[in-house]
Image: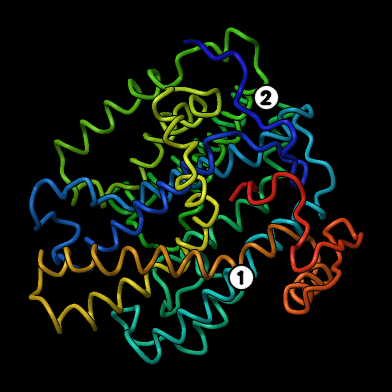
Amino acid sequence: MAVLEPQVDRAAEVNGVSHVMGLDGLRGLAALYVVLFHCRLLAVPGFPENSGPFWLGWLMYGRLAVVFFLVLSGFSLAISPARNGWRQGSIPRFLRRRAWRILPPYWAALALSLLVALFVVPASHHGPPTDRSVVVYGFLLQDLFTARTPNGAFWSIAVEAELYLLFPILLFVRRRLGATFLVVGVTLLAVARGLSAENGSPVEGDNWLTPNLAPVFVAGLVGAGILVGRERIRRLPWHWLAALAVIPVASLIAVKGSAWTVNHYFWVDLAVAPAMTMFIAAVATGRPALLMRLLATRPMRSLGNFSYSLYLIHLPIVMVVVRKIAPEFVSAGMPTFWFTLIVGLPASVLAAWLFAEIFEMPFKRYRSWKSVLAAGRARVSGGCEETPGGGVSHRPGVPQVPVGVGQLEK
């Protein structure tokens, strides 16, 4: 059945962004895949070769989930501008809200990761983090400067922050010069960067990979235009088009194997971005129906709601389980993998939910420290509290949340 209108909660407007049904669930599934990837990566040695059972091969490609996050981020951020003639509004306001949204939980996760890496299990083969690590990761400079990592998942947060800074410029080019010019221009810059590298393929993990990832973010940004396109555009079977677009990439990965794919992520990322964009557009327009029903379930929406926290803190937890706890009970290899799934996966999800309640949700619900602190005092005292809009709530112990809270783009 064709769905003409995007599945939008018209009442849910947070920071000027309409909430599109299904996108939260996609974030949750992507974050869950990253957790599974790290369970497999740490428990079964041999990466990037698939030294485990062949049926675990689908868990070899955690980076592609990060690429999906970036496409989805560009799509989500561009929804509101797309409905407003590709105009962003106040750039300082946009950047402040992005910083307010991502930095407090990131810094809290950085502190947690530093403690684990210093006193429990190092996150880097080069040893525990140093003062340089604190500075580089604290200021989100890890895409520009090398330092011993406290958390191997943090590399993408720096890339995303750089793309936020570029976002107003990308919108300006989209508005003035059009989608084609934006996509082709940014992609050609990335291609030139790739061809200039040794063997024509920069290796995953090198710094300065943002030129490769800017086009995937732009693909999502441009894809948001589907939601404001003509009826015949929204009618297109985007889920089937996505399936067709991913077949060549998936076939190449299957034929070449995981080691080749990891060594050519620079190009694989670019190749898979169109399929990801069309898939997100399909969900945003309410298709396929079976997937939409799954994404609309409460567990999926809840998982999506704290997916950022899950991404931030799962790796230290998984590392502790694999390297400190599992050896006391099971042998290495697949027994450790199963042990990690049974213990580490639920521990990561539960810890992320609790972490989000403390360090992420307050920064979704409230827009200033004054409001956050007032809400905290109200929870403790059970008295009146200041609402996000600056008013006062007299509902004892219950913070007032703006309509649509928890539905911010990542």
- Vertical comparison of 134 with 197: above or below: below
Q: Which of these two is toward me, 104 or 293? A: 293
Q: Could you tell which of marks 1 and 2 lies nearer the N-terminus?
A: 2
- Vertical comparison of 267 with 159: above or below: above
Residue 313 is left or right of residue 231, and the answer is left
Q: Which of these two is toward me, 284 or 161? A: 284
Residue 324, horizontal then vertical, whole percent? 24, 83
Q: Which mark is residue 202?
A: none
Q: Which of these two is toward me, 307 or 351? A: 351
> Which residue is denoted by mark 1 in the rendering?
359
Q: Which of these two is toward me, 53 or 93? A: 53
- Which one is closest to the eye, mark 1 or mark 2? 1
SS class, disc 1? helix
Residue 289 is left or right of residue 104, and the answer is left
Amino acid type indicated by mark 1 = Phe
**Alpha carbon separation for disc pair 1 and 2:** 39 Å
Total tally of numbered discs in the picture:
2
Residue 178, horizontal then vertical, whole percent? 67, 24
Amino acid type indicated by mark 2 = Gly
Look at 49% across and 40% down and name the residue there.
Answer: 216
> Which residue is denoted by mark 2 in the rendering?
178
Look at 50% across and 72% down and name the residue there.
Answer: 145
Residue 85, horizontal then vertical, whole percent? 78, 27
The answer to whether marks 1 and 2 mark residues whose Cβ atoms lie closer than 8 Å is no
Look at 50% across and 36% down and name the residue there.
Answer: 296
- Location of residue 346 by image quarter: bottom left
Residue 260 is left or right of residue 234, and the answer is left
Q: Residues within 10 Å of mark 2 (few under 14, many from 20)?
A: few
Residue with the most extreme top position: 232
- Vertical comparison of 52 with 2: above or below: below
